[in-house]
Amino acid sequence: MRTAIVTGASSGFGLLTTIMLAKQGFHVVATYRSDDKMKYIEEESEKNGVKNNVIIKKLDVTHEDSLLKFSNFIKSLDKIDVLVNNAGMAVGGFSEEVPLAAFRAQFETNVFGAIAVTQIVLPYMRAQKAGHIINVSSVSGTVGFPGLSPYVSSKHALEGWSESLRLEVASFGINVVLIEPGSYKTSIWTTGRYVPEEAQKETSPYAPMMKKIERILDKSASSFGDPSEVAKLITDIATKNQRTKLRYPVGKGIAQTVWIKKILPWSLWERIVRKQMG
């Protein structure tokens, strides 16, 4: 039985991926951070008839003690075929106003958390000379947006690290993949999004721009994609035995947006974005 580890499995892409992998016959270790969210994994596993294929484990990817306990737990696994680094959060706000502590918290989860779990898993994949490491990034990992600088910078860092990691472990038969979703109907833009108080003041010089961004998000929310599309892509990659691509942009117009940004001069790209921001 193939084994997969999915971090941040209590909602969104992580929860859907857990269920889809379990339905494909994977033995899935689904991790959660908050105790109040564990029930969602239990309920969905039961409802979809895959309860016996899912092991639910608590893991806070930002805490050393939690990582150590998880490291000890996976010693009991026969093998690890797939790691899905999905745990994440989104800090919004403008660079001048977001405290460094909030920037650090953003990187602790989205970047250092993924690195920490990967370091735990890699020795097992190297020994078996096979494995998939699937890092859930974002279109924000290739395209910068105003008002989201903490989140954007963390995803850019995840992308750069993944490029290096893929080159480092390829000779051991390990694939490293980046999933780059656009906007989907998940909790990261609601309960998973955090804007520090300093960045919410009406007196802020950035307040008009922030209100514009909020209006754009609210207006476009109804067109956000079905997150099961991303979970299916992750599941399809996890079941492949051959070499994979590095990047998989997914979502309406995302591949086109990334391509246009690559070919346009920065001055023209900047003009387009600023026009959208009014």
Image (cartoon, helix red, strand yellow):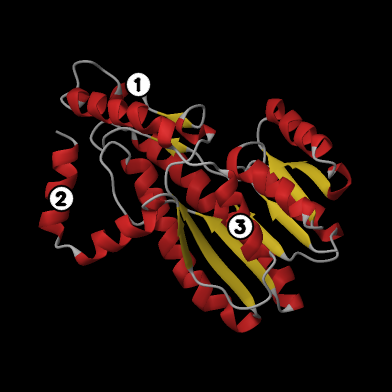
Circle on res. 197 = 1
The residue labelled by disc 3 is 234
In the displayed structure image, the side of residue 250 where residue 20 appears, left or right: right
Q: Where is residue 40 in the image (x, y as percent from the top left)?
A: 72, 31
Q: Where is residue 117 in the image (x, y as percent from the top left)?
A: 63, 55
Q: In which quadrant of the rendered image does the N terminus lie?
A: bottom right
Specify the amino acid type for callout 2: Glu
The answer to the question of whether label 3 and label 2 lie on touching residues, with beta carbons closer than 8 A, is no
Specify the amino acid type for callout 1: Glu
The answer to the question of whether label 1 and label 2 lie on touching residues, with beta carbons closer than 8 A, is no
Circle on res. 270 = 2
Q: Quadrant of residue 258?
A: bottom left
Q: Can residue 104 be seen in this view?
A: yes
Looking at the image, which is closer to me, 65 or 191?
191
Query: Of label 1 and label 2, which has the lower sequence position?
Result: 1
Q: Is residue 248 above or below residue 210?
A: below
Q: Quadrant of residue 227?
A: top right
